[in-house]
C-alpha cells in the first residue's frame, strides 16, 4: 500500500510452501528512495490533510504585517517594505510568502532568488530588483571540498543556471531548509516522517471507493486440493499481484486447474476506513504541528477552536515565521544598510491577543505588582502614576487619596477623567472619586 509517496521494493520470501494452504504477506515493503516531485504531487496535491495543514500555516504567515526597525525605531516607509509588498511582477506579497513557506513545508526546502538588472549570478551586496520563489524541483545544491554549498544549480528544460556561493557563504540564492541529520545540503520534508500515513489515506480512499463500486466484495480465499507445482505457484502469485492495490479491489478472477476463488463479503465494520484514516490524519497533523481540531471534519466546539488556533500559532506559524525573518535579516536586509531589523506586528496576531487578554484578566487580581509592572508584562509602555502598589480591597493607591483630600479638586467628574488619563479603569476611577467626593458631599 505504501508505494505512492516513495518507491518501495517488495521483499522476496526466503521460504515457500508447496502445501494447499498458507498465508502470503502482501504488505512487506522496504523504503527505497524518494523524489521532490512525489512530495509535491502525491503528498500535497492528492492528500486533503496535507493540503489543509500546509494551507493553514502558509496562508496565516502570508497575512502577517511585516515591520522594519532602524536602531530600535519603527520605520514607516522603506525600499525593503516596498520590495516585500511587491516582490516581483507576477506575485503579490501574500502569494510570494505563501509560495516560499508552502514549498518548505512540502519538500523541506525553499529557494528565493535575488534578481538584478544585469542578470548576474554572482552575489551582490546592493538591493535586488525583484525576489522570486524558485521551485525546489528544479534546484540542486553542489557541495564544495568542505561539504558546504559551492553553488546552486537551476535546471529547467536542460537549461542550467549556476549561482555561485562566495567565501563568506553568500549567494543570490537564499536556501531555507528543514533540519536533516544525514544531509547538510538538503532539508528533510515533514512528509518523509509520515509517508506511510499519507499513503494510507490515499490508498484507503481508493480501496473504499472500489469496494463500494463493486458491491462490497473483495478478493477472497484461493483453495485447491492438489499439490502446487512451481509453475502453478508462480501463476497464482502473479494473479495475487494483479488483485491487490486500491485500483484492483473488487475485481472478478478467472481461474482454472481446480483452483477455487471464494469471495469474502465485508461487514460494515470492515468497510469502515474512517478510524484508520483518522489515525493517519492525526499523525500528519502532528508532524506539521497543526492541532487535529483544525483538520478534523467533525464540528469542534468554539472554545476548542480558539485554543487550537493558539496552538497552531505556537507550534507551526511562529516557528516558520521566525525562520523566514531570521534568514531574510541575514541574507536580504544587510544589502540596505546597517542597524535594520525586519520583524512583524505582534498586535495584529489574534492568538497573541487572546493570550494577552487571559493574562490581563489574571493580572487584575494580582496585588503585589504595580500598574506599570503589569503593563510591562504584556508589552505596554509605562504611564504616569503607575508605579504605586494598590490596596487589596479597591485597588486604589492610598497616597493618591490622601493627596486629593488635602489638595481638593474642582468636581467629581473631572477627577474621574484625570484618573482615567493616568491609566485607571473607569470603575476604579469612580471608586476613588466616590471615596473622596461622596464623603465631602455628605
Image (cartoon, rainbow, N blue to C red):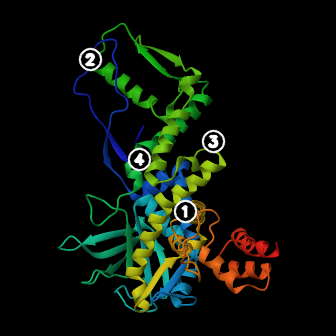
> Residue 194: which numbered mark, if any?
4
Residue identifier under label 3: 298
Callout 2 secondary element: loop
Q: Crowding near pointer 3: few (<14 within 10 Å), some, many (20+)?
A: few
Residue identifier under label 1: 366
Rendered position, 22 above or below 76: above
Of the 4 image quadrants, the one containing the N terminus is top left
Q: Which of the 4 image quadrants contains residue 365?
A: bottom right
Asked whether the viewer can see residue 203, the reply is no
- The mark closer to the camera, 2 or 3, is 3
Rendered position, 18 above or below 325: above
Mark closer to the chain start, 2 or 3: 2
Real-space Cα separation, disc 4 to disc 3, in angstroms: 22 Å
- The mark closer to the camera, 1 or 2, is 1
Q: Name the residue rendered at 51%, 84% in the picture.
A: 68
Mark closer to the chain start, 4 or 3: 4
Callout 4 secondary element: loop
Judge by depth and name the residue closer to the eye, 136 or 325.
325
Q: Are marks 2 and 3 in contact (CB under 8 Å)?
A: no
Mark closer to the chain start, 4 or 2: 2
Residue identifier under label 2: 17
Q: Name the residue rendered at 51%, 17% in the picture.
A: 263
Rendered position, 120 above or below 134: below
Mark closer to the chain start, 1 or 2: 2
Real-space Cα separation, disc 2 to disc 3, in angstroms: 47 Å
Asked whether the viewer can see residue 19, the reply is yes
Callout 3 secondary element: loop
Residue 150: x percent and y percent? Answer: 26, 76
Q: Which of the 4 image quadrants contains residue 239?
A: top left
- The mark closer to the camera, 1 or 3, is 1
Amino acid at each position: 500500500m505504501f508505494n505512492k509517496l516513495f518507491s518501495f521494493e517488495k521483499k522476496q520470501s526466503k521460504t515457500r510452501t508447496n502445501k494447499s494452504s498458507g498465508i502470503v504477506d502482501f504488505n512487506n515493503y522496504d523504503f527505497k528512495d524518494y523524489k521532490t516531485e512525489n512530495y509535491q504531487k502525491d503528498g500535497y496535491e492528492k492528500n486533503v490533510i496535507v493540503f489543509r495543514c500546509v494551507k493553514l500555516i502558509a496562508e496565516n504567515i502570508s497575512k502577517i504585517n511585516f515591520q522594519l526597525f532602524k536602531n530600535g525605531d519603527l520605520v514607516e516607509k522603506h525600499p525593503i517594505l516596498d520590495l516585500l509588498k511587491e516582490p516581483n511582477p507576477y506575485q503579490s506579497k501574500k502569494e510570494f510568502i505563501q509560495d516560499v513557506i508552502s514549498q518548505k513545508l512540502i519538500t523541506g526546502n525553499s529557494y528565493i532568488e535575488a534578481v538584478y538588472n544585469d542578470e548576474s549570478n554572482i552575489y551582490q551586496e546592493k538591493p535586488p530588483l525583484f525576489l522570486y520563489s524558485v521551485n525546489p524541483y528544479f534546484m540542486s545544491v553542489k557541495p564544495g571540498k568542505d561539504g558546504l554549498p559551492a553553488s546552486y544549480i537551476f535546471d529547467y528544460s536542460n537549461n542550467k543556471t549556476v549561482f555561485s556561493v562566495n567565501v563568506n557563504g553568500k549567494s543570490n540564492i537564499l536556501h531555507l531548509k528543514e533540519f536533516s541529520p544525514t544531509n547538510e545540503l538538503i532539508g528533510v520534508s515533514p512528509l518523509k516522517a509520515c509517508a506511510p500515513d499519507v499513503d494510507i489515506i490515499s490508498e484507503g480512499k481508493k480501496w473504499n471507493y472500489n469496494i463500494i463500486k463493486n458491491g462490497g466484495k473483495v478478493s477472497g480465499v484461493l483453495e485447491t486440493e492438489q499439490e502446487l507445482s512451481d509453475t502453478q505457484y508462480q501463476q497464482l502469485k502473479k494473479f495475487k499481484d494483479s488483485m491487490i492495490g486500491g485500483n484492483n479491489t473488487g475485481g472478478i478472477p478467472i481461474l482454472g486447474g481446480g483452483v477455487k476463488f471464494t469471495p469474502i463479503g465485508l461487514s460494515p465494520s470492515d468497510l469502515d476506513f474512517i478510524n484508520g484514516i483518522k489515525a493517519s490524519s492525526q499523525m500528519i497533523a502532528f508532524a506539521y504541528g497543526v492541532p487535529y481540531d483544525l483538520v478534523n471534519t467533525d464540528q469542534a466546539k468554539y472554545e476548542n477552536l480558539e485554543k487550537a488556533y493558539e496552538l497552531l500559532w505556537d507550534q507551526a506559524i511562529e516557528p516558520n515565521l521566525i525562520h523566514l525573518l531570521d534568514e531574510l535579516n541575514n541574507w536580504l536586509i544587510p544589502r540596505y544598510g546597517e542597524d535594520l531589523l525586519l520583524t512583524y506586528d505582534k498586535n495584529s496576531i489574534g492568538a497573541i491577543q487572546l493570550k494577552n487578554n487571559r493574562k490581563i484578566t489574571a493580572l487584575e487580581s494580582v496585588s503585589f505588582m504595580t500598574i506599570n509592572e503589569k503593563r510591562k508584562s504584556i508589552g505596554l509602555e509605562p504611564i504616569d502614576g503607575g508605579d504605586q502598589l494598590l490596596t487589596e480591597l479597591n485597588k486604589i493607591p492610598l497616597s493618591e487619596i490622601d493627596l486629593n483630600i488635602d489638595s481638593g479638586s474642582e468636581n467629581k467628574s473631572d477627577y474621574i477623567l484625570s484618573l482615567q488619563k493616568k491609566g485607571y479603569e473607569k470603575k476604579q476611577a469612580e471608586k476613588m472619586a466616590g471615596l473622596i467626593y461622596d464623603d465631602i458631599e455628605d
